[in-house]
Image: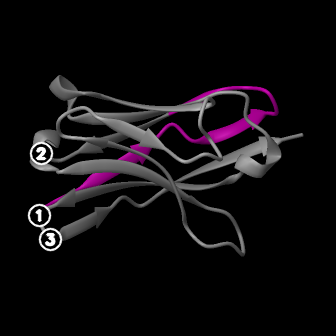
Amino acid sequence: QVQLVESGGGLVQAGGSLTLSCAASGSIFSYNTMGWYRQAPGKQREWLAFITSGGSTNSADSVKGRFTISRDNGKNTVYLQMNTLNADDTAVYYCNGIRGNSMYWGQGTQVTVSS
């Protein structure tokens, strides 16, 4: 059974940093892409960044330069390093994996930025 488990969320002060982790139940090479999304209260889910099985990355303009996606193949884990956080970054953050025609989601991890 496919499982994606996020961790690393929490409460942080504005200007601070957090690193989120997404641990996959199998090899992350089996996913065409893995990515991060977030959803703030009352807002639609927003794409943040992805990394392909070949290692290519891309990120949304709204977080470019502040958020960095990376992965550790040996740990089957994808990370989202988040710097210079502000109150607008408060949301539930979700890990996503695409394998063939299927899309998988983690349960989400809450990030709260206090101003």
Residues at marks 1 and 2, CA–CA distance in whole angstroms: 15 Å
Q: Which label was assigned to residue 100?
A: 1
Which segment did they paint magenta? Answer: 1-19
Q: Secondary structure at mark 1?
A: loop
Query: Mark 1 near mark 3, Cβ–Cβ under 8 Å?
Result: yes
Query: Relative to 102, does residue 108 appear above or below in the rendering?
Result: above
Specify the amino acid type for callout 3: Asn
Mark nearer the N terminus (3 vs 2): 2
Q: Which residue is mark 3?
A: 101
Give the residue at the far right of this rendering: 115
Q: Secondary structure at mark 3?
A: loop
Q: Residues within 10 Å of mark 2 (few under 14, many from 20)?
A: some
Rendering quarter of residue 101: bottom left
Q: Which of the pair 98/58 is nearer the observer?
A: 58
Specify the amino acid type for callout 1: Gly
Residue 99 x %, y %? 15, 59
State which mark lies toward you, 1 or 2: 1
Rendering quarter of residue 70: top left
Q: Is residue 90 left or right of residue 57?
A: right
Q: Which label was assigned to residue 26?
A: 2
